[in-house]
Image (tube, helix red, strand yellow):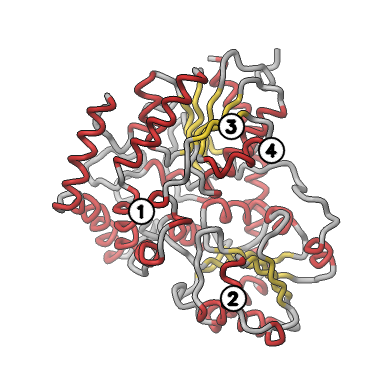
């Protein structure tokens, strides 16, 4: 029997946090296996994503309600401001402080343990930020594969200066937004980023959290955490990227770069208003800033002004959530080239459309790779943590430009970057080259083949 289509002997359990940027590639991979007829596929995540799992004909296992403290979508405005502040280290520190909650992780661990007892999986496919799932797999002796929707160096570079890393000494620290070629000041900044990360764990407040974590881990029978355990113990790591989108380093054999993990396209029927509008345009700037971004009235006004300045040369399609649309000026004051949607039948179908010439994005892992997959150059307004890393690599790869003042959104800055990307054919040419490399990497098809190989061992 062909190993690419052989059925599983025992159940496979996917586990992910509920955020779309983490969950969506996992859903695509699970759906690909389901289409191949692999039986006994299960997907464990938070209850609000039940319909998304059941839509792909995979059995859903609930991990309960979304925990607001652990989900970026539900953080209050104060926390949002802390994790998206201008200082990259302070934002990185804020993310750690707000997500390192042993008590809440333990609740998810216990919920998942019940699922594992019921399903008895022979393999777990775990989204890379699901630390509780890795802990459970190790405790129960269940082999697992990690799914990584970020750059490969994101998971292979330690924040601790004394810990093991798979990347060489002096490699840019994740979330620092630093380039491969650093000035002396940037090299010092890179070293300090690691040292400051280590130092924050010696703060008395963090000491209490560490003590709580040690107590809970002992209660659950877990070993002490190690930064690279999830990588070292994984049977395989599936990374939705390609080497050319990261800085060069020797990638371990167990990490497989499969490019963006895409569903079959088109996702939606072409008979919809957005598709018809795109068909009528010659050049479109697509603005989409993900599910986490919260714009202010001033930022919304600045983006409307950007569209106004592009009128006569380019149309603008803007995906703006309903809860932020009250910040818009009255309809009669909006430029005629601007179309605003609170929801799109498929962002992927939009990016695939030939009229879309540039993607104005926050630079999250999925959006960054999806834009390039379709050969679209980018203008990046980095939001937080990994977005700065994608932004600097996109710039150095010749596929994108980054706003000088991303927090304020200066119309002059945005129009300048968009115009440069739109008028210099080198950006599109390089994006198309890297898009072809992503498609050659195989995406969901290659990832499913690799999962089946692991299942057959």
Residue 283 visible in image: yes
Tell me whether circle 2 and circle 1 mark residues in contact (CB < 8 Å).
no
Mark found first going from the N terminus, 3 or 4: 4
| Nearer to us in this view, 152 or 39 | 39
Foreground mark, 3 or 1, reads: 3
Distance from disc 2 to disc 3, alpha carbons, whole Å, reads 36 Å
Mark found first going from the N terminus, 3 or 1: 3
In the shown orientation, is residue 447 left or right of residue 189? right
Foreground mark, 4 or 1, reads: 4
Q: Residue at x 24, y 27 (%)?
A: 219
| Nearer to us in this view, 285 or 129 | 129
Tell me whether circle 2 and circle 3 mark residues in contact (CB < 8 Å).
no
* Label of residue 326 in the image: 2
Q: Quickly name the residue at label 4.
A: 55
In the shown orientation, is residue 340 left or right of residue 217? right
* Label of residue 60 in the image: 3
Tell me whether circle 4 and circle 2 mark residues in contact (CB < 8 Å).
no
Q: Is residue 391 above or below residue 257?
A: below
Q: Residue at x 30, y 51 (%)?
A: 170
């Amino acid at each position: 029997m062909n190993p690419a289509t052989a059925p599983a002997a025992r159940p496979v359990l996917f586990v992910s946090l509920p955020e779309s940027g983490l969950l969506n590639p996992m859903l695509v991979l699970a759906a690909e296996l389901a289409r191949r007829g692999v039986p006994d596929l299960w997907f464990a995540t938070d209850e609000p994503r039940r319909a998304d799992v059941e839509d792909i004909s995979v059995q859903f296992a609930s991990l309960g309600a979304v925990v607001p403290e652990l989900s970026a979508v539900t953080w209050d405005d104060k926390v949002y401001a802390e994790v998206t502040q201008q200082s990259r280290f302070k934002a990185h520190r804020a993310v750690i402080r707000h997500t390192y909650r042993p008590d809440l992780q333990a609740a998810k661990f216990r919920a998942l343990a019940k699922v594992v007892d019921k399903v008895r999986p022979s393999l777990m496919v775990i989204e890379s930020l699901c630390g509780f799932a890795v802990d459970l797999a190790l405790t129960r002796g269940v082999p697992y594969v990690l799914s990584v929707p970020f750059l490969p160096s994101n998971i292979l570079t330690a924040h601790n200066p004394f810990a093991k890393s798979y990347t060489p000494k002096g490699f840019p620290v994740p979330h620092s937004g630093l380039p491969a070629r650093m000035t002396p000041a940037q090299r010092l900044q890179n070293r300090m980023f690691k040292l400051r990360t280590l130092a924050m764990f010696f703060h008395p407040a963090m000491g209490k959290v560490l003590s709580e974590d040690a107590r809970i881990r002992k209660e659950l029978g877990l070993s002490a955490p190690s930064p690279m355990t999830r990588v070292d113990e994984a049977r395989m790591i599936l990374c939705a990227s390609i080497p050319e989108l990261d800085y060069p380093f020797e990638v371990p054999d167990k990490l497989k770069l499969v490019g963006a993990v895409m569903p079959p396209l088109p996702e939606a029927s072409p008979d919809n208003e957005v598709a018809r509008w795109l068909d009528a345009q010659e050049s479109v700037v697509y603005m989409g800033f993900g599910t986490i971004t919260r714009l202010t009235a001033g930022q919304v006004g600045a983006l409307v002004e950007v569209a106004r300045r592009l009128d006569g040369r380019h149309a603008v399609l803007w995906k703006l959530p309903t809860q932020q649309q009250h910040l818009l000026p009255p309809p009669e004051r909006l430029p005629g080239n601007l179309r605003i949607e609170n929801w799109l039948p498929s962002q992927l179908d939009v990016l695939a459309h030939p009229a879309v010439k540039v993607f104005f994005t926050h630079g999250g892992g999925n959006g960054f790779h999806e834009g390039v997959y379709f050969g679209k150059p980018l203008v990046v307004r980095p939001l937080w943590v990994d977005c700065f890393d994608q932004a600097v690599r996109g710039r150095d790869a010749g596929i994108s430009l980054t706003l000088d003042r991303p927090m304020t959104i200066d119309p002059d800055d945005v129009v300048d970057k968009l115009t440069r990307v739109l008028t210099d054919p080198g950006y599109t040419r390089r994006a198309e080259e890297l898009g072809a490399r992503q498609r050659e990497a195989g995406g969901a098809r290659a990832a499913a083949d690799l999962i089946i190989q692991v299942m057959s061992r």
